[in-house]
Structures are given as C-alpha cells and as structure tokens.
Amino acid sequence: MSSNDAIAGMIKGVLSWTEDKIKEYLTKFKHRDLAFIEDPQTITLAVEQRKKSEWDLFKKYIDDYDLRVLFQTGLTLRVLENTNKDRLESLRGRILKKHGPKGLHIAQFVQNGFFGKYIGNILERASTPEELKSGIKNLLNNIEKTCLFVNVRDDVEKRSQEAIIKINANCPETFIISSIGSAMKKCEKIKEKVMKGISGYTIELYKTDIKEIYFFNRSSPT
Amino acid sequence: MTELVPIKDMPQELKIMLVKELGYDSDGTYVLLKNGEKHLDRYTGEPVRIDNMAIFPGSTIILDNNLLSIISFLEEFGDVV
C-alpha cells in the first residue's frame, strides 16, 4: 500500500454534517484521535516529503529547526513545480516572507536537487560524520556567501566578479556555481572567469541535460 | 494514528460551532480569540480563515491550511498524523 493510499484510507469521504456528528468528532478530537483539515491534500503532500530518502539522510545530520523546515519546503517545491504552479508560487511567497531571501535560496537549493550532489562532493573530503554535519550546516547557513545561482538574464562579467569577491572574502570550504536550462552556457563562461580570478581551489562538475553544478573545493589552507 | 477529517464541505455555521466548542470564536470570516482579536497562524502569523483551517489535537492548534504551516507543524510535533 502506498503512503497515499494509507493516508487516503484515514480520510473520511463524503460526510453528512450534523451537530451530533460534530460532537462525536469532538470527543475523538479531545482524545487526540482526530484532526480537522480543510484540504487533506496539503498534509498528504507534506507527509510524503518526510518519507523521502533525502530527508532521511538530511535529518540525521541537521538538528536546526528552520533548516529542517526549509529542507522539507524545498522537497515540496520540487513536487509542485511539475504539478501545481499556483501552489508553488504561494509556497515560495510564504517562504520568502517568513525566512527571507536566504531561506528561499536554501529551499531552492534543495528543490533543484543540489543537496544530493553536494553530499556526493563533500563525502570524499569529510572524514567523520561531524565534519559532514559541519559542512552541511556551514553551506546552508552561509548560502548567500557560498552559492551563486546563475540566471539566463545575468551579466557574465558582473556575476563572475560577484563570485570572485565572495570566494576571496570568505574562503569557503566549498563554493557552488549552478544553473538550470538555458542559463547553462552563461554558467560555463562565469566558471571560466572565476577560475582565472581565484587560487587555491579545485573544481568538480556535475552535469545533466538540464542542470549543471560547479563545486569549487578549497585545496589549500587559508 | 490520528484520523483526518476533511471539513471542506462542512457548512460554515457548523465550522463556527466547532471553533466555539474549542474555545475560539468567529466573525464568519476569521477565527477569533475570545477577546475578539483575530487568531494568527502559529508559523506564518497570518489570520486564520474559517474556510481554510487545519485543527490539530493536543493543545488545540488551529493553523491556516497552507504548506509552510503544515510542514512547520509536522517538524515541531512529529508525525502525529
């Protein structure tokens, strides 16, 4: 039985609402056996994300409440981008309002599947679980300093300089430059310029037909 | 496991009765506190509308039925449903 089926099985179908019925439900509610919800799809979608292997991995390393919420919103955005654009925009808006641009960037990082790629990248260098945990936390908590998301309308020169300044100012363990779809050509040009403007970093590329991620890994001590 | 009861089709007057039974009030649009102020969603700070509620047992938490609030609730209280 799928999780959908299991949850659907819990959900009452068409109900005839009467005061007596409400009182019956209230008794169950007071015994904590029941919850009322306008649209059960909302909770179904949220629960499904908590069963994913990415979440299972992430939660083992990260205790921070906000990061954990943002991670789950990122997984949810990924589902909505193919199924419901209105809900996607609504969720994006609420993330922005509650957690600011940084929070939205963290959620989008997860939405675009970059977390899994990052884990693949850092596993080669993190020798202990503590180092892995620290790496994940540092990356996400400093996402404005450690990631550059390239858009198709970006000015290559400006974004390259932005990345170079961030890397030279913060010397992050890992700096990520990423893009999706039609922005990939600009992303490659930016990567070339950045490589010429910094030192002490090696580069690793993950690329599919629709997205690419450059990991700049610090190779020399700061 | 907690049973989920969808209330999309519940008549508004019964929804108002429901929130009153739980110690809240309503002006017909929003869920209100006993002092008449709008009840705000615990996570987003938005006023909770009577036509878009999620009500969870325990400390009787009434949320706006949106994804950020539900995800935040599940993270705070665990997989209670």
Image (tube, helix red, strand yellow):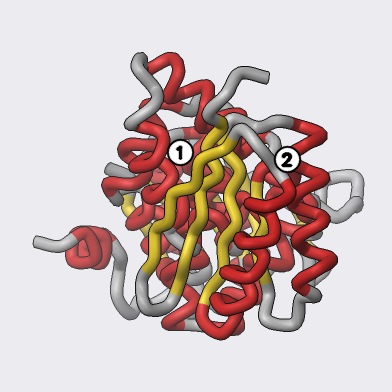
Q: Is residue A131 left or right of residue A109?
A: left
Q: Chain of mark 2?
A: A
Q: Label 1's element?
A: helix
Q: Residue at x 51, y 66 (%)?
A: A77
Check contact, mark 2 vs mark 1: CB within 8 A.
Answer: no
Q: Position of residue A14 (x, y in %)?
A: 33, 80
Q: Residue at x 73, y 49 (%)?
A: A197
Q: Position of residue A43 (x, y in %)?
A: 44, 59
Residue that label 2 marks: A167
Q: Work out whether residue A141 or residue A159 is closer to the camera in this orientation and state it.
A: A159
Q: Residue at x 50, y 38 (%)?
A: B75
Q: Position of residue A66 (x, y in %)?
A: 63, 37
* Neighbours of disc 2 within 10 Å: few (<14), some (14-19), many (20+): many
Q: Work out whether residue A188 or residue A68 is closer to the camera in this orientation and state it.
A: A188
Q: Is residue A163 left or right of residue B19?
A: right
| Amino acid bearing label 2 | Ile
Q: Is residue A98 visible?
A: no
Q: Label 2's element?
A: helix
* Quarter of the figure that contains the N terminus of chain B: top left
* Neighbours of disc 1 within 10 Å: few (<14), some (14-19), many (20+): some
| Amino acid bearing label 1 | Lys
Depth-wise, is mark 2 or mark 1 nearer the camera? 2
The answer to whether dots 2 and 1 both sit on one chain is: yes
Q: Work out whether residue A90 or residue A180 is closer to the camera in this orientation and state it.
A: A180
Residue that label 1 marks: A30
Work out whether B9 lies above or below B67: below
Q: Position of residue A170 (x, y in %)?
A: 76, 32
Q: Residue at x 61, y 43 (%)?
A: A175
Q: Is residue A22 visible?
A: yes
The quarter of the displayed image where residue A86 is located? bottom right
Identity of the residue furthest to the left in this view = A1
